[in-house]
Image: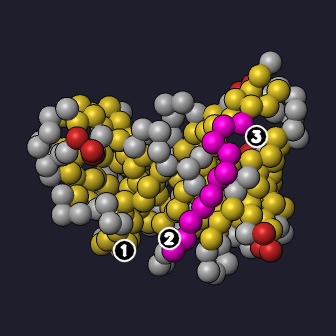
């Protein structure tokens, strides 16, 4: 069965510092991979997606992610974090028949310190 | 920019009561979904809907749940007899094909 692992429950980063959030997936075929962000009390906003092609994908708000098939990973990065980036981040894999339910990881809560 | 909308934003109900959660997907999208997120837990898939029928459902989506697209614009999730464990945030999503757009959610509280 498809699964997504986000090993870090919480991460604290200083404002201006770089960020990397880890995501590992398990899926038999070529995965569709996504990162979503959820601010408190809000819905899920798509940050970026990978379907095929260039393994480094750019998203909104200055985020990028790199697909590494050999490591089954899709880590999210940002070179300089802003206080407004504090939120919960979810990695997800598209799985199932047709198109396709999303299987989410448990999320990583990002805290930004001054 | 078009977006998915959901009503109500918060629903409080008594155990055993029926609730209907409503969603208006983005107008040209073809695939529709419901997910739920119990407080502090991850987002879980409930059901997907395409061409006026359920295309996939999870183990959570038992006989107490049903979905409907009654008028070509709304997409509803009905829970027939709510249980305490149904308390969660319910998200609707729609997709033109490969990318899902989520609504803001309905927080359901079952007392």
- Mark 2 or mark 3: name the one nearer the start of the chain: 3
CA gap, disc 1 and disc 3: 34 Å
Q: CA distance from mark 2 to mark 1?
A: 9 Å
Q: Are marks 2 and 1 on the same chain?
A: no
Which quadrant of the figure contains the C terminus of chain A? top right
Q: Nearer the viewer, residue A63 or B51?
A: A63
Q: Is residue A2 magenta?
A: yes
Depth order, front residue of A21/A78: A21
Please tell me which residue is depicted at 73% across the width and 52% down the height of the picture.
Answer: A22
**Chain of the residue under the numbered disc 2 shown in the image:** A
Q: Which residue of the protein is positioned furthest toward the bottom in this rendering?
A: A29
Label 3: few (<14), some (14–19) or many (≥20) C-alpha neighbours in 10 Å: few
Q: Identify the residue under disc 3.
A: A61
Q: Which mark is residue B55?
A: 1
Q: Is residue A25 left or right of residue B60?
A: right
Q: Secondary structure at mark 3?
A: helix
User: What residue does disc 2 label?
Assistant: A100
Where does the image place residue B5, in percent across and percent down from the top left?
42, 42
- Give the residue at x 63% y 42%: A9
Q: Secondary structure at mark 2?
A: loop
**Residue span colored magenta:** A1-11
- Relative to B18, A66 lies left or right: right
| Chain letter behind tag 1 | B
> How far across and down, in percent of the image, does residue B43 sit?
47, 51
Which residue does the image show at 14% across and 39% down from the upper left? B15
């Amino acid at each position: 069965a498809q699964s997504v692992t986000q090993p870090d429950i919480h991460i604290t980063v200083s404002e201006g510092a770089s960020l990397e959030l880890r995501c590992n997936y398990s899926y038999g075929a070529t995965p569709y991979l996504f990162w979503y962000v959820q601010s408190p009390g809000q819905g899920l906003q798509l940050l970026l997606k990978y379907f095929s092609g260039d393994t480094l994908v750019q998203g909104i708000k200055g985020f990028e992610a790199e697909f590494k098939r050999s490591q089954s990973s899709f880590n999210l990065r940002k070179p300089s974090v802003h206080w407004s980036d504090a939120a919960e981040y979810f990695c997800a894999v598209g799985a199932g028949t047709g198109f396709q339910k999303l299987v989410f990881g448990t999320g990583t809560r990002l805290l930004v310190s001054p | 920019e078009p977006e998915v909308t959901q009503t109500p934003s918060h629903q409080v109900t008594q155990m055993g009561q029926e609730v209907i959660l409503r969603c208006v997907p983005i107008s040209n999208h073809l695939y529709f979904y419901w997910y739920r997120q119990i407080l502090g837990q991850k987002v879980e898939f409930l059901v997907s809907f395409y061409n006026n029928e359920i295309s996939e459902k999870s183990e959570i989506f038992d006989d107490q749940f049903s979905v409907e697209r009654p008028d070509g614009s709304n997409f509803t999730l009905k829970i027939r007899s709510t249980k305490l464990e149904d308390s969660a945030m319910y998200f609707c999503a729609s997709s033109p094909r490969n990318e899902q757009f989520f609504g803001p959610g309905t927080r359901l509280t079952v007392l």
